[in-house]
Amino acid sequence: MRRTSDEARLAPAAGSGRDRETGRTRAQAMRAAIAGGVLVGAGALAGGWMGAEPTAGRASRTQDVQILNFLLVLEELQIAFYAAALRGGALSGDLLRFARTVSPQEREHAGLLRKLLGDDARPAPRFGVEQSASHAATFQADAIDLEETIAAAYIGQGASLTRGAMRDAARIVAVEARQAAWIRDIAGADPAPRAADPARSADDISSDLRRRGFIR
Amino acid sequence: MTGGTVLRLEDVDRDEALLETIAALHGDTRADFLRKAVLGSAGMLALLGAPPSASAAMSATDLDILNFGLRFERLQASFYTEAESMGVVGKMAPRKQEWARTLGAHERAHVRIVKEILGDRAGPRPFFDFHGVTESEDSFTRTAVAMEDLTVALLTGITPRMRDRALVAALFGLLTTEARHAAWARSIVRTTPAANAFDEPRSLDGVHALLGRTRFIVSAPRVRRRRRAPRMTG
């Protein structure tokens, strides 16, 4: 089945279960790794217990393009979400200050990703954010979700990037995590609920955001 | 590093220090905790043929960077632990106590995790002298804010420098936790938790120099000087 450009953009090599470069399945790659004396973690074999493993395959410009385009969709989704919330006028106090501060930060993140991608940047898909952004309560809950999602996406993909892109991913993900902690604090939730943050696979994130109508 | 194999922090939590911390902090039921732990051990059983520690194959660069990271995590863990044992944390407002205790528990878990990764190549525990900053709420809080922001800058710098991509993946999950700590600390002192669009890295040398100026790490254990008895006169 031929994928639309949006689907292709939302599905980097991660989670396909097949190493795109060698055509091996992930299980084969893992067995090879064990035979080669590489320590494989319990979590990876326990399958989904702690989240998915980052993208398989050797770092390359081709893989960077897939990953950075995926992360760009998430940054663009956040931009659309905060823009709708600021347009809607339902926010006040801490929530308004939060949205006004992080909105331009997300635009800078997207700008940097587009710069890294150059001509390989793909256009944004359509987003469904108006409904969620029109009430303070839904805005707050969804802002937490989106910030957590994007932090987990960078954690999942960061190690698979080439070194230059990885340096920029580190500069961005730290800010995404700060934003996640900030909005959780505003909501009265624990800003740092874990001693180490887990990754989420691109497939998991993409299907979740589609199911919830954030990405159409 | 063989492509497709990724070591994450959870993966090296072999003595379940991290799970214990999470369970203790966040009220996982005992059953829930055990269920997860069993899954973890089942995975470990499949790996008996694997080397016991990643350190055997670790590059000199990674080893040096991680050992520096260990010193830094130990510094942080000692800082929070000392403030708790001095009773400073116990006198804070409830929300602030939760903050200080959570950060302390996380830093102690980080020490155990990094030690586990390094195995027998972990450096010795240094001695610390916080020169009284853990003894008052105000100086403790201000130092915590600075230290958490510095940790973020350190991890932003060293994470992409690790050669082993499995370790890079692990450090990404630590970097975000430290960034949450920094944001939370800034919120406690009512400054903007995320002030800039990017967190800029600091070099290892830069952090080393900064730490040197604090004189928090000392070559010999801190000995509390006895107050000199008043000299007898007459």
Image (cartoon, grey):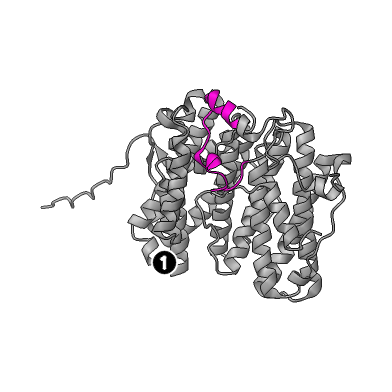
Classify residue B13 by image quadrant: top left
A127 relative position to A205: left or right: right
A195 relative position to A186: left or right: left
Magenta includes A45?
A: yes
Residue in the picture at 63% in, 58% down: A180
Residue in the picture at 43% in, 48% down: B37
> Badge 1: few (under 14), some or many (20 or more) residues near its Cα, within 10 Å?
few
Quadrant of the drawing holding the N terminus of chain A: top right
Judge whether B29 appears above or below B34 on screen: below
- The amino acid sitting under disc 1 is Met
Q: Secondary structure at mark 1?
A: loop
Provide the residue designation for mark 1: B92
Classify residue B24 by image quadrant: bottom left
Judge whether A81 appears above or below A16 on screen: below
Q: Which residues are magenta?
A: A30-53
B33 relative position to B170: left or right: left
Q: Give the residue at the far front of this rendering.
A: A1
Residue in the picture at 59% in, 26% down: A32
Residue B40 on image: x %, y %: 46, 44
Residue B59 visible (yes or no): no
Residue A183 visible (yes or no): yes
Residue B217 on image: x %, y %: 42, 39
Residue B173 versus residue B89: which sits nearer the camera? B173
Magenta includes B197?
A: no
Quadrant of the drawing holding the C terminus of chain A: bottom right
B189 relative position to A155: left or right: left
Residue B185 versus residue A181: which sits nearer the camera? A181
Q: Chain of mark 1?
A: B
Residue A166 on image: x %, y %: 69, 38
Residue B45 versus residue A60: which sits nearer the camera? B45
